[in-house]
Image (cartoon, helix red, strand yellow):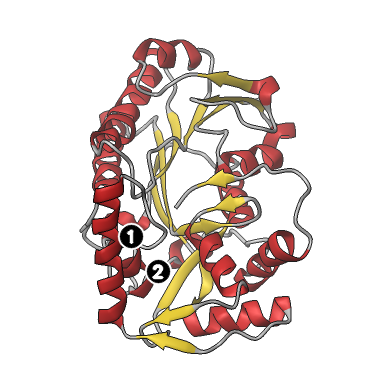
Amino acid sequence: MTNLILIGGSGFVGTRLTDMIKPEYNLKIFDKQPGPFHPEITVIGDVRDQEIMNRELSGQDAVVLLAAEHRDDVSPPSLYEDVNVQGAKNVLTAMDQNRVEKIIFFSSVAVYGLNKKNPDEQHPPDPFNHYGKSKWRAEELLREWYQHRPGTRSLTIIRPTVIFGERNRGNVYNLLKQIASRRFLIIGNGNNYKSMAYVANVAAFVKYLLKRITPGYQLFNYVDKPDVNMNQLVALVEENLGIRVPSVHLPYPMGMMIGYSSDLLAKLTGKTPAITSVRVRKFCATTQFDATRAHQCGFIPPFSLEEGLSNTLRYEFVHPPRDEVTFVSE
């Protein structure tokens, strides 16, 4: 049985992936904090600690690297570099020491920047924030590592779009919750499309790739298609929850004014508000990405995007769980 370590595996994607592949692998989770569901296979540690990484990769056959600082309010910003870039470098050093030559790395479509027209994997990088820049630098480190022994090493990089699903407390959940509350304003005309990925499909894609690891380099965007725009998303929430949402649109300049006011308030109070100028820009941006390569490699997602959204809406707002286990992300 293959020895597989999920670094950052106590998080949202890692937990769902563990549920899916645990019977098939000799699995270890490495994370800076314990997860709620798989403590028996979890080791606590930090990717910034080279000694611990060297020890925990001993005997491993392959790595899935999920660990990252990913929120847009991380402070200090140097943590993006320390965790996402230096952390990746530490993992590669530990892999070299332990002769581990297979890795799947979670990057992000943030490497493309905002308002790009449906970029595929060949699109030039243009990250606009600390997170995207750190993910691009980590990718470059991984490609450099791969090029030292391309005949024996296996590197797969996945650039997922925003990931949503049951128990997640990120931007998509916050958006769905706001729509479900019926106190929702669309900023702009609502025709901006949002690429999204359902967590069960993302985990299934990783499982599919793990079964096919061979020497070589692969790069995939991951998006569940077809994309939906904001108006369509509101209609989907209405259909699943049996509600009507007021169709009020706020002009974009006014939305940005509210965002900048919130930024100023955050500086004065030290508290991060629900609305910021960055989040308004993200909300109004068209975030479509080409995932043709992922969907033509033989992988068939177990759920459509609409099914994933419907599952999430019913789980969170119709039949919510009795426990309070959630995962915080963007």
Amino acid type shown at disc 1: Glu
Q: Position of residue 210 (x, y in %)?
A: 57, 40
Left or right: 59 as drawn, with respect to 262: right
Residue 146 seen in this snapshot: yes
Q: Answer few, some or many: residues within 10 Å of disc 2's Cα (few below 14, many 20 plus, some between 14 and 19).
A: many
Q: CA distance from mark 1 to mark 2?
A: 8 Å
Residue at coordinates 48% horizontally, 17% vertically from top-left? 57
Residue 43: assigned label = none
Mark 1 in CB contact with mark 2 (< 8 angstroms): yes
Amino acid type shown at disc 2: Asp
Front residue (pair 274, 27): 274
Front residue (pair 284, 306): 284
Front residue (pair 143, 82): 82
For label 2, the SS is loop
Pointer 2 residue: 290
Pointer 1 residue: 121
Query: So how many labels did they put on this image?
Result: 2
Left or right: 9 as drawn, with respect to 185: right
Q: Position of residue 51 (x, y in %)?
A: 38, 10
For label 1, the SS is loop
Q: Position of residue 286 (x, y in %)?
A: 35, 75
Q: Position of residue 89 (x, y in %)?
A: 30, 27
Residue at coordinates 56% horizontally, 60% vertically from top-left? 173
Query: Is 280 rendered above or below residue 320?
Result: below
Residue at coordinates 44% horizontally, 22% vertically from top-left? 100
Q: Quadrant of residue 307?
A: bottom right
